[in-house]
Amino acid sequence: MRFLIIFIFLITNSFAEENPNIKNLIVNKQLKKYDSLRFFDKNNNQLNLDDFRGKLILINFWATWCLPCKEEMPSLDLLQKKKILNNLKIFPINVGQEKIEKTEKFFKDLKIRNLDLYFDNQITLAKKFALRGIPTTIILNKNGEEFARIIGSIDFTDVKFIDWLSSYN
């Protein structure tokens, strides 16, 4: 009887780690590796995600005209300042091919203070990740490998999500 209880406990905990039952979250069965993940900051400087190895990376693809993007952006902003996630770097990447002024106004209107602006105007990065729509969030481990993605919007301040994400920090 004791063996059965321990066995069930181990199976349940293993499953919970792989499938945390968070809305719109898909945990990959195998890690996905990508080459040359480049995008631009608001000053049109090209960035390479390889330069951020060692950090937990969250890439959020969005556009100003996307209502679910607008709804989730404030919670994404709050996620960046969570002390428990001090090794997390968030890249909100606008794929809407919009002018910087419109994007800056979007952030200002939503009172986004903890995130910087990034762009993928040629949608090169979005194509590499094979996005099917926005918002989509890609989560990369410290080695730059995709281990999960969120298809659609979520509340990034959800305690269940923060607890799950902090286990990778």
Image: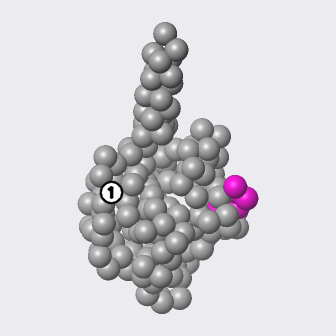
**Residue 122 versus residue 114 in the image, above or below:** below
* Viewer can see residue 102: no
Q: Is residue 29 left or right of residue 17?
A: left
Residue 165 in picture, x, y percent from top left: 56, 50
The one nearer the camera, 104 or 88, is 88
Residue 76 in picture, x, y percent from top left: 60, 56
What kind of colouring is applied to the model shown?
one colour
User: Residue at position x 47%, y 18% from top?
Assistant: 3
User: Residue at position x 42%, y 49% from top?
Assistant: 150
Look at mark 1 in the image and give the residue it sits on.
Answer: 31
User: Residue at position x 50%, y 22% from top?
Assistant: 6
Q: Residue furthest top?
A: 1
User: How many tags in the picture?
Assistant: 1
Which quadrant does the C terminus fall into? bottom right
* Viewer can see residue 135: yes
Q: Residue furthest right?
A: 83
Quarter of the figure with residue 78: bottom right
Within the magenta stretch, is there residue 82? Answer: yes
The one nearer the camera, 153 or 157, is 157
User: Residue at position x 43%, y 77% from top?
Assistant: 49
Assign a secondary structure to mark 1: strand
**Residue 30 versus residue 95 in the image, above or below:** above
* Mark 1 Cα shell of 10 Å, populated few (<14), some (14-19), many (≥20): few
Q: Amino acid at mark 1?
A: Leu
Residue 126 in picture, x, y percent from top left: 32, 66
Within the magenta stretch, is there residue 114? Answer: no
The one nearer the camera, 91 or 53, is 53
* Majority secondary structure of magenta residues: helix
Give, as a single range, the part of the protein colored magenta. Answer: 80-84
**Residue 78 versus residue 46 in the image, above or below:** above
